[in-house]
Amino acid sequence: PPYYDLPKFVWCLKFAIGFTILVCMHVYWPAFANLEIPTRDEITSSHFSGWYLIAYAFSTTQTVEGTWKKSMLRMFGTAAGGFSAWLALTACNDNPIGLG
């Protein structure tokens, strides 16, 4: 017999609606679609504007506890990465070989 689970169905529905809203914002809202952070890099690379969809998919979990835990770990990882970058820039100063 098939197994139906209403809470999982509701979560899937909310996830699909959120994903659809993000895609519609990208397609029909030019200010959101052209949102990018300008850089002064000499190397030009391809521009991928779908990172928000990946972030939404990875950060949305089925439980509030899971979302909270993942959000806290993401904030801790961002802070640790920023501190590591600051430490590397401070230690290497203007040495291009040290950061290369």
Image (cartoon, grey):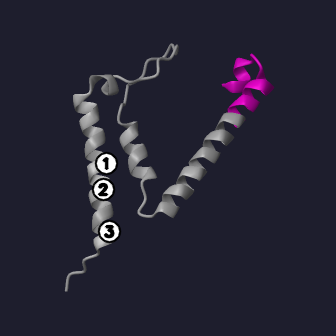
Residue located 26% across and 27% down the image? 29
Give the residue at x 68% y 31%.
85
Vertical placement of residue 89 versus 22, above or below? above
Q: Residues within 10 Å of mark 3 (few under 14, many from 20)?
A: few
What quarter of the picture does the N terminus occupy?
bottom left
* Residue found at the far bottom of this picture: 1
Crowding at mark 2 (Cα within 10 Å: few <14, some 14-19, many 20+): few
Q: Mark 2 and 1 residues: CB-CB less than 8 Å, in contact?
A: yes
Numbered mark located on residue 18 in the image: 1
Expressed as whole percent of the image width and height from the top left, the position of residue 4 reads 25, 77
Locate residue 72 relative to residue 37 in the image: left or right: right
Amino acid marked by disc 2: Lys
The residue at which mark 3 appears reads as: 8
Determine the CA span between mark 1 and mark 3. Answer: 15 Å
Please name the amino acid that badge 3 sits on. Lys
Q: Earlier in the sequence, mark 1 or mark 3?
A: 3
- Sequence-wise, the earlier of marks 2 and 3 is 3
**Span shown in magenta:** 84-100
**Residue 96 within the magenta-colored segment of the rendering:** yes
Q: Is residue 52 magenta?
A: no
Q: Which mark is residue 14?
A: 2
Q: Main secondary structure of the magenta part?
A: helix
Local packing at callout 1 (Cα closer than 10 Å; few below 14, some 14-19, many 20+) is: some
Q: Estimate the x, y position of residue 78 in percent, counting from the top left.
A: 61, 40
Q: Amino acid at mark 1?
A: Gly
Q: Secondary structure at mark 2?
A: helix
Number of marks drawn: 3
